[in-house]
Amino acid sequence: MAATTVDVGTAPDGTLVIHPHGGLDEADAVDLQRTLVHAIRHRRPLRLILDLVDVSDLAPINLGTLVAACALGDDHQVAVFLDHPRPHIADRLAAAGVPAHRLRHVNGGPPPARE
């Protein structure tokens, strides 16, 4: 990603963790899409966690990419979770259609209640 660094790792249980740092703006859109599609369609972990703790802002196109990643994960039997989003990012993701159970540890707290 152009202005954003991304760490990708695998937890001992096989969970793939993608950890972007900084703002995800329009310049990062293609790389974010490629990273997520490759992870979901080719690596096919049982779980994929996008750790958003260091993401300060999210461009609308990347917001849509994260919503689509949840649906793509469902299609390929990959559970996609968005961990540690800042409250304003979590609100935007929820408004865009990300189910509440996929937004975990908002602002470092417990997962939000299911609706």
Image: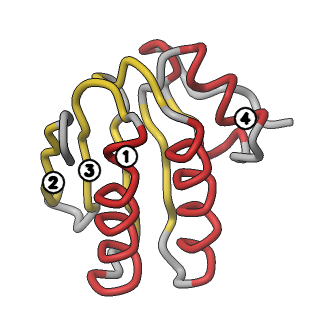
Determine whether, in the image, residue 63 is placed left or right of residue 91.
left
Q: Tag 4: residue type?
A: Ala
In whole angstroms, how far apart are the C-alphas of marks 1 and 3? 5 Å
Identified by mark 3, the residue type is Ile
**Which numbered marker is on residue 103?**
none
Q: Residue furthest front?
A: 27
- Percent across and percent down for residue 74 are 61, 74
Disc 1/disc 4 C-alpha distance (Å): 15 Å
Q: CA distance from mark 3 to mark 4?
A: 20 Å
Whether residue 70 is situated above or below residue 78 in the rendered picture? above
Please, what secondary structure does the residue beneath circle 4 have? helix
What amino acid does circle 2 point to? Answer: Val
Q: CA distance from mark 4 to mark 2?
A: 24 Å
Which residue is tagged 4? 94
- Residue found at x 64% / y 68%: 71
Q: Earlier in the sequence, mark 3 or mark 4?
A: 3
Instruction: Look at mark 2 in the image and give the residue it sits on.
Output: 8
Residue 91 percent coordinates (x, y) = 69, 23
Query: Mark number for residue 50?
Result: 1
Q: Are marks 1 and 3 in contact (CB under 8 Å)?
A: yes
Label 1 CA crowd tier, 10 Å (few <14, some 14–19, many 20+): many
Q: Marks 3/2: CA distance?
A: 5 Å
Which residue is tagged 3?
18
